[in-house]
Image (tube, grey):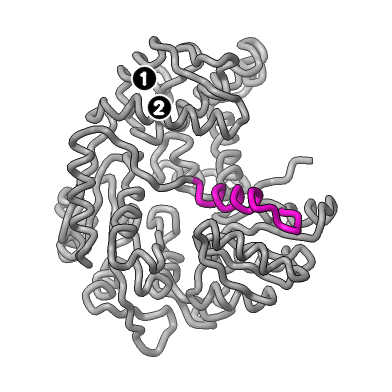
Amino acid sequence: MRLLIVGDLDGHITTAGKIAMDRGAKVAHASSITDALNALRGGRGADLVMVDVKLAVQDLCDALAAERIHVPVVACGIGSDARAAVRAIHAGAKEYVPLPPDAEMIAAVLEAVAEESHAILTQDPGMQRLLRVAEQVARSDASVLIVGESGTGKELFARFLHRKSRRSDRPFISVNCAAIPENLLESELFGHEKGAFTGAIARRIGKFEEASGGTLLLDEVTEMEPRLQAKLLRAIQEKEIDRVGGARPVKVDLRVLATTNRALEDEVRAGNFREDLYFRLNVMTLALPPLRERPADIELLAIHFMQRYAAANGLGTKSLHPDTMAMLRAHPWRGNVRELENTLHRAVVLSPGPVIEPDAVMVMDAAATLGGPAAGAANRAAAAVSALDGAVAGTAALVGRTVADVERDLIIDTLHHTLGNRTHAANILGISIRTLRNKLKQYHDEGVAVPMPGEPERAYL
Protein backbone atom coordinates (compact mmCIF):
# COMPACT_ATOMS: atom_id res chain seq x y z
CA MET A 1 0.00 0.00 0.00
CA ARG A 2 1.42 3.36 -1.09
CA LEU A 3 -0.14 6.31 0.73
CA LEU A 4 0.29 9.94 -0.35
CA ILE A 5 -0.69 12.50 2.32
CA VAL A 6 -1.40 16.00 1.04
CA GLY A 7 -1.36 19.08 3.28
CA ASP A 8 -0.15 20.17 6.68
CA LEU A 9 -3.02 18.97 8.90
CA ASP A 10 -1.70 21.03 11.82
CA GLY A 11 0.92 18.49 12.83
CA HIS A 12 -1.43 15.48 12.74
CA ILE A 13 0.15 14.41 9.47
CA THR A 14 3.08 12.87 11.34
CA THR A 15 0.75 10.81 13.50
CA ALA A 16 -1.40 9.69 10.56
CA GLY A 17 1.68 8.74 8.59
CA LYS A 18 3.16 6.77 11.48
CA ILE A 19 -0.07 4.84 11.98
CA ALA A 20 -0.18 4.00 8.27
CA MET A 21 3.49 2.91 8.27
CA ASP A 22 2.86 0.73 11.33
CA ARG A 23 0.15 -0.96 9.24
CA GLY A 24 2.63 -1.66 6.45
CA ALA A 25 2.00 1.33 4.18
CA LYS A 26 4.72 3.27 2.36
CA VAL A 27 4.00 6.94 3.06
CA ALA A 28 4.94 10.02 1.01
CA HIS A 29 4.01 13.65 1.64
CA ALA A 30 3.07 16.56 -0.60
CA SER A 31 2.44 20.00 0.85
CA SER A 32 -0.01 21.16 -1.83
CA ILE A 33 -2.40 19.94 -4.54
CA THR A 34 0.10 20.99 -7.20
CA ASP A 35 2.91 19.01 -5.53
CA ALA A 36 0.62 15.98 -5.22
CA LEU A 37 -0.31 16.07 -8.90
CA ASN A 38 3.32 16.48 -9.91
CA ALA A 39 4.25 13.47 -7.78
CA LEU A 40 1.56 11.31 -9.38
CA ARG A 41 2.40 12.50 -12.89
CA GLY A 42 6.08 11.87 -12.23
CA GLY A 43 5.64 8.17 -11.57
CA ARG A 44 5.62 8.29 -7.79
CA GLY A 45 2.28 6.52 -7.77
CA ALA A 46 -0.07 5.97 -4.86
CA ASP A 47 -2.79 3.49 -3.96
CA LEU A 48 -4.53 6.08 -1.79
CA VAL A 49 -4.40 9.87 -1.41
CA MET A 50 -5.33 11.44 1.96
CA VAL A 51 -5.85 15.20 1.56
CA ASP A 52 -6.45 18.01 4.04
CA VAL A 53 -10.08 19.07 3.64
CA LYS A 54 -9.00 22.72 3.81
CA LEU A 55 -7.27 22.31 0.45
CA ALA A 56 -9.07 22.34 -2.90
CA VAL A 57 -10.35 18.76 -2.87
CA GLN A 58 -12.57 19.48 -5.86
CA ASP A 59 -9.60 20.71 -7.91
CA LEU A 60 -7.62 17.60 -7.00
CA CYS A 61 -10.44 15.20 -7.94
CA ASP A 62 -11.18 17.08 -11.17
CA ALA A 63 -7.50 17.03 -12.17
CA LEU A 64 -7.20 13.30 -11.43
CA ALA A 65 -10.29 12.58 -13.54
CA ALA A 66 -9.16 14.82 -16.41
CA GLU A 67 -5.73 13.20 -16.52
CA ARG A 68 -7.06 9.67 -16.00
CA ILE A 69 -5.04 9.12 -12.81
CA HIS A 70 -7.13 6.49 -11.07
CA VAL A 71 -6.45 6.69 -7.34
CA PRO A 72 -9.03 6.92 -4.52
CA VAL A 73 -9.06 10.12 -2.47
CA VAL A 74 -9.88 10.35 1.25
CA ALA A 75 -10.37 13.76 2.87
CA CYS A 76 -9.12 14.48 6.40
CA GLY A 77 -9.95 17.35 8.74
CA ILE A 78 -9.65 18.46 12.34
CA GLY A 79 -12.69 17.23 14.25
CA SER A 80 -16.01 16.11 12.84
CA ASP A 81 -16.97 18.97 10.54
CA ALA A 82 -20.14 17.69 8.85
CA ARG A 83 -20.25 20.44 6.22
CA ALA A 84 -16.62 19.93 5.28
CA ALA A 85 -17.20 16.18 5.05
CA VAL A 86 -20.22 16.63 2.75
CA ARG A 87 -18.30 19.07 0.53
CA ALA A 88 -15.41 16.64 0.24
CA ILE A 89 -17.65 13.69 -0.63
CA HIS A 90 -19.50 15.78 -3.23
CA ALA A 91 -16.13 16.82 -4.66
CA GLY A 92 -15.23 13.18 -5.27
CA ALA A 93 -13.58 11.94 -2.06
CA LYS A 94 -14.54 8.38 -1.17
CA GLU A 95 -14.46 9.00 2.60
CA TYR A 96 -13.91 11.63 5.29
CA VAL A 97 -11.62 10.84 8.23
CA PRO A 98 -11.73 13.12 11.31
CA LEU A 99 -8.48 14.08 13.01
CA PRO A 100 -6.65 13.56 15.35
CA PRO A 101 -6.38 10.20 13.62
CA ASP A 102 -7.74 7.05 15.21
CA ALA A 103 -5.54 4.00 14.58
CA GLU A 104 -8.48 1.70 13.86
CA MET A 105 -10.06 4.23 11.51
CA ILE A 106 -6.83 4.58 9.51
CA ALA A 107 -6.48 0.80 9.41
CA ALA A 108 -10.08 0.40 8.20
CA VAL A 109 -9.53 2.94 5.41
CA LEU A 110 -6.34 1.21 4.27
CA GLU A 111 -8.05 -2.18 4.34
CA ALA A 112 -11.06 -0.88 2.41
CA VAL A 113 -8.82 0.50 -0.32
CA ALA A 114 -6.78 -2.68 -0.49
CA GLU A 115 -10.15 -4.52 -0.81
CA GLU A 116 -8.57 -7.84 -0.14
CA SER A 117 -5.51 -9.37 1.49
CA HIS A 118 -4.43 -10.97 -1.83
CA ALA A 119 -3.95 -14.27 -0.01
CA ILE A 120 -4.65 -17.39 -2.10
CA LEU A 121 -6.86 -19.79 -0.17
CA THR A 122 -6.77 -23.37 -1.45
CA GLN A 123 -6.70 -26.95 -0.27
CA ASP A 124 -6.93 -28.39 -3.77
CA PRO A 125 -3.84 -30.53 -4.53
CA GLY A 126 -3.56 -29.22 -8.09
CA MET A 127 -3.67 -25.59 -6.97
CA GLN A 128 -1.13 -26.27 -4.25
CA ARG A 129 1.23 -27.76 -6.85
CA LEU A 130 0.69 -24.71 -9.04
CA LEU A 131 1.58 -22.42 -6.13
CA ARG A 132 4.83 -24.31 -5.60
CA VAL A 133 5.69 -23.90 -9.29
CA ALA A 134 4.79 -20.21 -9.10
CA GLU A 135 7.09 -19.73 -6.10
CA GLN A 136 9.98 -21.22 -8.08
CA VAL A 137 9.21 -19.12 -11.16
CA ALA A 138 8.91 -15.97 -9.04
CA ARG A 139 12.63 -15.93 -8.26
CA SER A 140 13.53 -15.25 -11.89
CA ASP A 141 12.78 -12.21 -14.02
CA ALA A 142 11.14 -14.28 -16.75
CA SER A 143 7.86 -13.08 -18.20
CA VAL A 144 4.91 -15.17 -17.07
CA LEU A 145 1.59 -15.66 -18.86
CA ILE A 146 -1.25 -16.49 -16.47
CA VAL A 147 -4.22 -18.04 -18.23
CA GLY A 148 -7.61 -19.11 -16.96
CA GLU A 149 -11.30 -18.42 -17.10
CA SER A 150 -12.65 -15.13 -15.79
CA GLY A 151 -12.84 -15.13 -12.01
CA THR A 152 -10.23 -17.82 -11.32
CA GLY A 153 -7.83 -15.46 -9.55
CA LYS A 154 -5.26 -14.57 -12.21
CA GLU A 155 -4.41 -11.20 -10.65
CA LEU A 156 -3.99 -12.86 -7.23
CA PHE A 157 -1.40 -15.18 -8.78
CA ALA A 158 0.36 -12.19 -10.35
CA ARG A 159 0.56 -10.50 -6.95
CA PHE A 160 1.83 -13.77 -5.45
CA LEU A 161 4.62 -13.87 -8.05
CA HIS A 162 5.57 -10.28 -7.20
CA ARG A 163 5.57 -10.91 -3.43
CA LYS A 164 7.86 -13.90 -3.85
CA SER A 165 10.22 -12.16 -6.28
CA ARG A 166 13.41 -10.20 -5.72
CA ARG A 167 11.40 -7.10 -6.66
CA SER A 168 8.89 -7.48 -3.82
CA ASP A 169 9.91 -4.21 -2.17
CA ARG A 170 9.37 -2.31 -5.43
CA PRO A 171 6.07 -1.25 -7.06
CA PHE A 172 3.47 -3.68 -8.38
CA ILE A 173 1.50 -1.88 -11.09
CA SER A 174 -1.54 -3.38 -12.80
CA VAL A 175 -3.08 -2.16 -16.06
CA ASN A 176 -6.41 -3.56 -17.26
CA CYS A 177 -6.02 -3.51 -21.03
CA ALA A 178 -9.72 -4.26 -21.49
CA ALA A 179 -10.97 -1.33 -19.42
CA ILE A 180 -9.06 1.48 -21.18
CA PRO A 181 -10.01 2.65 -24.69
CA GLU A 182 -7.34 2.13 -27.35
CA ASN A 183 -6.73 5.84 -27.88
CA LEU A 184 -5.92 6.25 -24.17
CA LEU A 185 -4.11 2.97 -23.49
CA GLU A 186 -0.89 4.02 -25.24
CA SER A 187 -0.58 7.09 -23.01
CA GLU A 188 -1.53 5.03 -19.95
CA LEU A 189 1.24 2.53 -20.63
CA PHE A 190 4.03 4.73 -21.99
CA GLY A 191 3.16 8.21 -20.73
CA HIS A 192 3.12 11.44 -22.70
CA GLU A 193 4.77 14.82 -22.94
CA LYS A 194 2.97 18.10 -22.37
CA GLY A 195 1.03 19.13 -25.47
CA ALA A 196 1.35 15.70 -27.13
CA PHE A 197 -2.40 15.69 -27.76
CA THR A 198 -5.51 17.60 -26.75
CA GLY A 199 -5.84 17.40 -22.98
CA ALA A 200 -2.15 16.64 -22.33
CA ILE A 201 -1.71 19.60 -19.99
CA ALA A 202 1.45 18.26 -18.35
CA ARG A 203 4.01 15.51 -18.73
CA ARG A 204 2.61 12.21 -17.49
CA ILE A 205 4.71 9.19 -16.56
CA GLY A 206 3.20 5.95 -17.86
CA LYS A 207 2.81 2.62 -16.10
CA PHE A 208 6.03 1.23 -17.58
CA GLU A 209 8.08 3.96 -15.92
CA GLU A 210 6.00 3.85 -12.74
CA ALA A 211 6.68 0.11 -12.44
CA SER A 212 10.40 0.42 -13.19
CA GLY A 213 12.33 -1.64 -10.67
CA GLY A 214 9.20 -3.66 -9.90
CA THR A 215 6.51 -5.62 -11.70
CA LEU A 216 4.00 -4.61 -14.39
CA LEU A 217 0.86 -6.69 -14.86
CA LEU A 218 -0.89 -6.45 -18.23
CA ASP A 219 -4.34 -7.73 -17.32
CA GLU A 220 -6.38 -9.19 -20.21
CA VAL A 221 -3.55 -8.44 -22.63
CA THR A 222 -5.45 -10.01 -25.57
CA GLU A 223 -7.81 -7.01 -25.55
CA MET A 224 -4.95 -4.79 -26.76
CA GLU A 225 -5.19 -3.64 -30.38
CA PRO A 226 -2.53 -5.04 -32.81
CA ARG A 227 -1.02 -1.57 -33.45
CA LEU A 228 -0.20 -1.16 -29.78
CA GLN A 229 1.02 -4.75 -29.51
CA ALA A 230 3.99 -3.82 -31.73
CA LYS A 231 5.00 -0.98 -29.42
CA LEU A 232 4.58 -3.25 -26.39
CA LEU A 233 6.82 -5.89 -27.98
CA ARG A 234 9.59 -3.33 -28.55
CA ALA A 235 9.29 -2.04 -24.99
CA ILE A 236 9.68 -5.55 -23.55
CA GLN A 237 12.53 -6.54 -25.88
CA GLU A 238 14.57 -3.35 -25.72
CA LYS A 239 13.65 -2.40 -22.13
CA GLU A 240 12.89 1.12 -23.25
CA ILE A 241 9.75 3.05 -24.06
CA ASP A 242 8.80 6.13 -26.05
CA ARG A 243 6.44 8.58 -24.40
CA VAL A 244 3.71 9.89 -26.67
CA GLY A 245 5.19 13.09 -28.11
CA GLY A 246 8.60 12.29 -26.64
CA ALA A 247 11.88 13.07 -28.40
CA ARG A 248 14.02 10.26 -27.00
CA PRO A 249 13.48 6.76 -25.59
CA VAL A 250 13.42 6.13 -21.83
CA LYS A 251 15.10 3.08 -20.27
CA VAL A 252 13.01 0.92 -17.93
CA ASP A 253 13.81 -2.09 -15.75
CA LEU A 254 10.80 -4.19 -14.85
CA ARG A 255 9.30 -7.63 -14.98
CA VAL A 256 6.23 -8.11 -17.15
CA LEU A 257 3.38 -10.44 -16.24
CA ALA A 258 0.29 -10.89 -18.41
CA THR A 259 -3.12 -12.50 -17.98
CA THR A 260 -5.79 -13.64 -20.42
CA ASN A 261 -9.02 -15.61 -20.31
CA ARG A 262 -8.68 -16.57 -23.97
CA ALA A 263 -6.77 -19.29 -25.82
CA LEU A 264 -3.84 -17.22 -27.08
CA GLU A 265 -2.86 -19.77 -29.73
CA ASP A 266 -6.32 -19.35 -31.28
CA GLU A 267 -5.98 -15.56 -31.14
CA VAL A 268 -2.60 -15.79 -32.90
CA ARG A 269 -4.04 -18.05 -35.62
CA ALA A 270 -6.97 -15.65 -36.07
CA GLY A 271 -4.57 -12.74 -36.53
CA ASN A 272 -5.79 -10.93 -33.40
CA PHE A 273 -2.54 -11.29 -31.47
CA ARG A 274 1.06 -11.01 -32.67
CA GLU A 275 2.91 -14.32 -32.63
CA ASP A 276 6.23 -12.70 -31.68
CA LEU A 277 4.58 -10.95 -28.70
CA TYR A 278 2.98 -14.23 -27.66
CA PHE A 279 6.39 -15.95 -27.55
CA ARG A 280 7.90 -12.98 -25.69
CA LEU A 281 5.22 -13.12 -22.98
CA ASN A 282 4.95 -16.88 -22.84
CA VAL A 283 8.34 -17.70 -21.33
CA MET A 284 6.41 -19.49 -18.59
CA THR A 285 2.69 -20.27 -18.44
CA LEU A 286 0.59 -20.80 -15.34
CA ALA A 287 -2.81 -22.27 -16.22
CA LEU A 288 -5.35 -21.76 -13.44
CA PRO A 289 -8.06 -24.43 -13.24
CA PRO A 290 -11.72 -23.38 -13.03
CA LEU A 291 -13.46 -23.69 -9.66
CA ARG A 292 -15.58 -26.64 -10.88
CA GLU A 293 -12.34 -28.63 -11.15
CA ARG A 294 -11.36 -27.69 -7.57
CA PRO A 295 -14.23 -29.18 -5.52
CA ALA A 296 -12.13 -29.18 -2.35
CA ASP A 297 -11.94 -25.38 -2.50
CA ILE A 298 -15.67 -24.67 -2.77
CA GLU A 299 -16.41 -25.24 0.92
CA LEU A 300 -13.22 -23.50 2.07
CA LEU A 301 -13.91 -20.39 0.00
CA ALA A 302 -17.64 -20.35 0.77
CA ILE A 303 -16.96 -20.28 4.51
CA HIS A 304 -14.28 -17.61 4.03
CA PHE A 305 -16.59 -15.31 2.06
CA MET A 306 -19.49 -15.93 4.44
CA GLN A 307 -17.39 -14.90 7.44
CA ARG A 308 -15.93 -11.88 5.63
CA TYR A 309 -19.29 -10.41 4.59
CA ALA A 310 -21.05 -11.26 7.84
CA ALA A 311 -18.37 -9.30 9.69
CA ALA A 312 -18.38 -6.46 7.15
CA ASN A 313 -22.14 -6.03 7.50
CA GLY A 314 -22.20 -6.41 11.31
CA LEU A 315 -24.38 -9.53 11.10
CA GLY A 316 -22.60 -11.62 13.70
CA THR A 317 -21.68 -15.28 13.30
CA LYS A 318 -23.33 -17.26 10.52
CA SER A 319 -23.08 -20.84 9.31
CA LEU A 320 -24.10 -22.74 6.20
CA HIS A 321 -26.92 -25.28 6.35
CA PRO A 322 -25.77 -28.73 5.07
CA ASP A 323 -28.29 -28.51 2.21
CA THR A 324 -26.88 -25.10 1.28
CA MET A 325 -23.37 -26.50 1.15
CA ALA A 326 -24.57 -29.40 -0.99
CA MET A 327 -26.14 -26.89 -3.38
CA LEU A 328 -22.87 -24.93 -3.60
CA ARG A 329 -20.87 -28.07 -4.30
CA ALA A 330 -23.23 -29.10 -7.10
CA HIS A 331 -23.25 -25.73 -8.89
CA PRO A 332 -21.00 -25.47 -12.03
CA TRP A 333 -19.66 -21.96 -11.10
CA ARG A 334 -19.22 -20.59 -14.60
CA GLY A 335 -18.09 -17.31 -12.99
CA ASN A 336 -15.63 -19.23 -10.81
CA VAL A 337 -14.42 -17.76 -7.49
CA ARG A 338 -15.83 -14.32 -8.30
CA GLU A 339 -19.31 -15.80 -8.79
CA LEU A 340 -18.99 -17.78 -5.55
CA GLU A 341 -17.97 -14.63 -3.67
CA ASN A 342 -20.90 -12.61 -5.03
CA THR A 343 -23.29 -15.48 -4.25
CA LEU A 344 -22.15 -15.69 -0.62
CA HIS A 345 -22.28 -11.90 -0.27
CA ARG A 346 -25.93 -11.91 -1.37
CA ALA A 347 -26.75 -14.93 0.80
CA VAL A 348 -25.30 -13.28 3.91
CA VAL A 349 -27.34 -10.12 3.33
CA LEU A 350 -30.56 -11.98 2.48
CA SER A 351 -30.40 -14.55 5.28
CA PRO A 352 -32.36 -13.32 8.32
CA GLY A 353 -31.04 -15.87 10.82
CA PRO A 354 -27.67 -17.27 11.90
CA VAL A 355 -27.94 -20.21 9.49
CA ILE A 356 -27.90 -19.58 5.74
CA GLU A 357 -30.69 -21.72 4.27
CA PRO A 358 -30.79 -22.84 0.62
CA ASP A 359 -33.54 -20.35 -0.27
CA ALA A 360 -31.16 -17.46 0.54
CA VAL A 361 -28.71 -18.63 -2.11
CA MET A 362 -29.29 -17.31 -5.63
CA VAL A 363 -27.05 -18.76 -8.30
CA MET A 364 -27.02 -18.38 -12.07
CA ASP A 365 -28.97 -21.03 -13.95
CA ALA A 366 -30.21 -21.52 -17.48
CA ALA A 367 -33.33 -19.47 -16.82
CA ALA A 368 -31.29 -16.53 -15.56
CA THR A 369 -29.45 -16.24 -18.86
CA LEU A 370 -32.53 -15.99 -21.10
CA GLY A 371 -32.36 -12.76 -23.08
CA GLY A 372 -28.57 -12.53 -22.89
CA PRO A 373 -26.02 -12.11 -20.08
CA ALA A 374 -27.01 -8.60 -19.10
CA ALA A 375 -30.69 -9.53 -19.11
CA GLY A 376 -29.78 -12.41 -16.83
CA ALA A 377 -28.12 -9.91 -14.51
CA ALA A 378 -31.30 -7.85 -14.56
CA ASN A 379 -33.37 -10.91 -13.68
CA ARG A 380 -31.04 -11.76 -10.81
CA ALA A 381 -31.19 -8.18 -9.57
CA ALA A 382 -34.99 -8.34 -9.65
CA ALA A 383 -34.83 -11.58 -7.67
CA ALA A 384 -32.66 -9.89 -5.05
CA VAL A 385 -35.16 -7.05 -4.72
CA SER A 386 -37.96 -9.57 -4.38
CA ALA A 387 -36.17 -11.44 -1.61
CA LEU A 388 -35.49 -8.25 0.31
CA ASP A 389 -38.82 -6.46 -0.01
CA GLY A 390 -41.28 -9.25 -0.66
CA ALA A 391 -42.10 -10.99 -3.91
CA VAL A 392 -45.04 -8.75 -4.78
CA ALA A 393 -43.30 -5.43 -4.04
CA GLY A 394 -40.10 -6.50 -5.80
CA THR A 395 -41.69 -7.46 -9.10
CA ALA A 396 -44.34 -4.74 -9.02
CA ALA A 397 -41.59 -2.12 -9.28
CA LEU A 398 -40.59 -3.58 -12.66
CA VAL A 399 -44.05 -4.07 -14.16
CA GLY A 400 -44.63 -1.88 -17.21
CA ARG A 401 -40.94 -1.60 -18.05
CA THR A 402 -39.13 -3.40 -20.86
CA VAL A 403 -36.23 -5.74 -20.21
CA ALA A 404 -34.03 -3.35 -22.21
CA ASP A 405 -34.93 -0.45 -19.89
CA VAL A 406 -34.25 -2.51 -16.76
CA GLU A 407 -30.99 -3.77 -18.25
CA ARG A 408 -29.85 -0.22 -19.13
CA ASP A 409 -30.60 1.16 -15.67
CA LEU A 410 -28.90 -1.80 -13.99
CA ILE A 411 -25.76 -1.36 -16.09
CA ILE A 412 -25.58 2.41 -15.54
CA ASP A 413 -26.22 2.12 -11.79
CA THR A 414 -23.58 -0.60 -11.50
CA LEU A 415 -21.08 1.66 -13.30
CA HIS A 416 -21.80 4.45 -10.82
CA HIS A 417 -21.26 1.96 -7.99
CA THR A 418 -17.85 0.96 -9.40
CA LEU A 419 -16.82 4.60 -10.04
CA GLY A 420 -16.92 3.98 -13.78
CA ASN A 421 -14.62 0.94 -13.63
CA ARG A 422 -15.73 -1.13 -16.63
CA THR A 423 -14.05 -4.36 -15.56
CA HIS A 424 -15.51 -4.36 -12.04
CA ALA A 425 -18.93 -3.53 -13.43
CA ALA A 426 -18.73 -6.37 -15.97
CA ASN A 427 -17.72 -8.78 -13.22
CA ILE A 428 -20.64 -7.74 -11.01
CA LEU A 429 -23.08 -7.98 -13.92
CA GLY A 430 -21.74 -11.35 -15.04
CA ILE A 431 -21.02 -10.21 -18.61
CA SER A 432 -17.85 -9.82 -20.66
CA ILE A 433 -16.06 -6.48 -20.89
CA ARG A 434 -16.68 -6.52 -24.65
CA THR A 435 -20.45 -6.96 -24.16
CA LEU A 436 -20.42 -4.11 -21.66
CA ARG A 437 -18.52 -1.84 -24.05
CA ASN A 438 -21.00 -2.55 -26.83
CA LYS A 439 -23.91 -1.74 -24.53
CA LEU A 440 -22.30 1.50 -23.37
CA LYS A 441 -21.62 2.58 -26.95
CA GLN A 442 -25.27 1.94 -27.76
CA TYR A 443 -26.40 3.98 -24.74
CA HIS A 444 -24.02 6.81 -25.60
CA ASP A 445 -25.34 6.90 -29.17
CA GLU A 446 -28.86 7.06 -27.74
CA GLY A 447 -27.92 10.11 -25.67
CA VAL A 448 -27.71 8.36 -22.29
CA ALA A 449 -25.11 9.78 -19.86
CA VAL A 450 -22.50 7.06 -19.33
CA PRO A 451 -20.13 7.34 -16.30
CA MET A 452 -16.47 7.68 -17.27
CA PRO A 453 -13.70 5.71 -15.50
CA GLY A 454 -12.82 7.40 -12.23
CA GLU A 455 -16.10 9.35 -12.13
CA PRO A 456 -17.38 9.55 -8.55
CA GLU A 457 -20.62 8.00 -7.43
CA ARG A 458 -23.75 10.10 -7.51
CA ALA A 459 -24.57 11.61 -4.13
CA TYR A 460 -27.88 10.60 -2.63
CA LEU A 461 -29.02 12.95 0.14
Magenta-colored span: 97-115
Judged from this view, the residue extending furthest toward the bottom is 247
Q: Which mark is residue 191?
A: none
Q: Residue 228 location in percent, x, y?
A: 32, 67
* Residues at marks 1 and 2 touching, judged by CB atoms closer than 8 Å: yes
Given the image, on which type of amino acid does mark 2 rest? Answer: Ala
Nearer to the camera, 361 or 163: 163
Separation of marks 1 and 2 at Cα, in angstroms: 8 Å
Q: Residue 58 location in percent, x, y?
A: 73, 63
Q: Is residue 107 magenta?
A: yes
**SS under mark 1:** helix
Quarter of the image for the C terminus: give it. Answer: top right
Q: Which residue is mark 1?
A: 328
Q: Give left or right: position of 288 versus 424.
A: left
Residue for point 67% across, 64% down: 15
Residue for point 67% across, 69% down: 14
Q: Which residue is mark 2?
A: 302
Q: Is residue 416 magenta?
A: no
